[in-house]
Image (tube, rainbow, N blue to C red):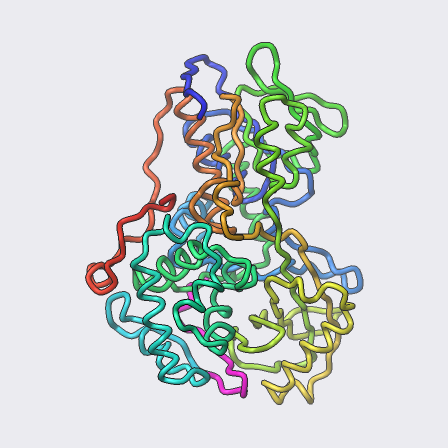
Amino acid sequence: MVEEKQDNSSDQTVAIVGGGLAGIAAAVLCRQAGCPVTLLESRQRLGGRATSYVDAQTGETIDNCQHVSMGCCTQLRHLCESLGIRDAFETVDKLYFVAPDGRITPFSALPLPAPLHLSGAFARLPYITWNEKRHFASAVKQMARTERKSLRGVNLLTWLKEHHQTENLIHNVWEVVLISALSESIDRIDAAYAQKVFTDGFLAHRDGWKVEIPTIDLDELYSERTLHALEEMAIQVRLNAAVEHLQQTSGHKIELRLRDGEAITASNVVCAVPHHRIPRLVGQLPEFQGLLQQVQQIESAPITSVHFWFDRPIMDLPHAVLIGRLGHWVFNRGERSLNGQTACLYQVVMSASRNLEGQGSESVIAQVANELRQIWPATKSATLVHSRMVTERRAVFSATPGIDQWRPPQQTAIPSLQIAGDWTQTGWPATMEGAVRSGYLAAMNILRRHNLPVPDLPGELPVSRSARWLLRIPKQGSGS
């Protein structure tokens, strides 16, 4: 733990490396406190892993993967409100589950307090037996009542088997929720993070489970609207500005050396980059040898998405959760212009997609397209105009058993240097919410260092009285 030293000097400059959500959050909070802020992003777009690509064949900009949030993600919502982009998200309070036999079941809340609000939705799922539903409810109740520290380091699959969860329950309920939320296979998940997802998302508050979906492309959301908002705040945003490494100056400041040879000096620096980029940035600093060893223990997990352009609509649902299939979610992205013609775009997301390694994109696309034909007959008469598969091999950090011991705090061994990113200590898994929280935590360290007021930020959604009474959910903060 670094001893906090206040710096009341007039130099409160902040340089932030990385234009993802962690970097954006840190920039906004520091600027709102009056600090001069420069945000450096190596690519030509903001958003980090929430980004878009230009499809070489069509020239159309497409998202790398559909990004969604949930009602329990309070600080992401706070950031969006600060940036004026909250209107770019749609709140979804009804999901659609497609059973292995093709039956589609709506999933929505009853007008009851948490945790009873979703009891009817789970009860209606047709692909698990009533006895399995009873065992599932018992396991969820036991998980919610367990102190989080007791679940840390516990392999989730082992825990599920010990609590009488059948293979059908594991594959068609637990995996459906957790692989999408954590992008990791059940046998590689720390049980504490499974508890985090179920408690915060489904049990504690009746709004926690609601899905928030961007209504515009990620490129427009971050590279246009967010960029404009940051510039309106007088934050200097520099795109295509790759930082090669950092070094400490004799005046206890940090020098950032850019790829083109330019050097920038700041009183405070936030490294808001993925964990695998940390060694290159700070590897020359002797204070970081311990951090580098920690970072090497953190693994990454891939996410794959397949984009389909059909000549006509194939489904009338806005989205659907696919059970027992290669694809996990399908999102209806509406009509798009494709080579001067109108086409209907659908995106199928496959989280924790290690199982696709070694398969060619043509094979995966064919398998997923066949799944769509089996579910929606209109696909058989539609013409597939174009398709593309995109894989983010380092999409998220893996929430493996014991991961918390390797996640570092935002404050480093150098008082003027912070790190941020969803992989740092936030109490949250690899989510947009975790990224925002890390950026805010790094920024608050800077504000304290300069004796500046630290704002009150939204905490977790409150646990409902009925959830406390029925589940006896222990009081535990995000870092418990």
- The image shows residue 65 at horizontal and vertical percentages of 61, 60
The x, y position of residue 298, in whole percent, is: 59, 45
Judged left or right of residue 184, residue 366 is: right
Magenta segment includes 92: yes
Q: In which quarter of the image is residue 290?
A: top right
Up the image or down, 194 lies above or below 380; here it is above
| Between 45 and 450, the one nearer to me in the picture | 450
Residue that extends furthest to the top in the rendered view of this protein: 250
Magenta part mainly helix, strand or loop?
Answer: strand
Q: Is residue 395 left or right of residue 109?
A: right
The residue closer to the viewer here, 288 or 120, is 288
Residue drawn at 60 percent across, 43 percent down: 297
Is residue 10 toward the left or the right of residue 285 in the image? left
Any part of residue 398 in sight: yes
Q: Where is residue 400 in the image (x, y as percent from the top left)?
A: 53, 53
Q: Where is residue 255 in the image (x, y as percent from the top left)?
A: 63, 20
The residue range painted magenta reads 90-104
Q: Quadrant of residue 187?
A: bottom right
Instruction: Note whether 259 is above or below 366 in the view shown.
Output: above
Of residues 319 and 325, the one nearer the viewer is: 325
Q: Specify whether residue 219 is in view.
A: no
Q: Residue at x 57, y 42 (%)?
A: 227
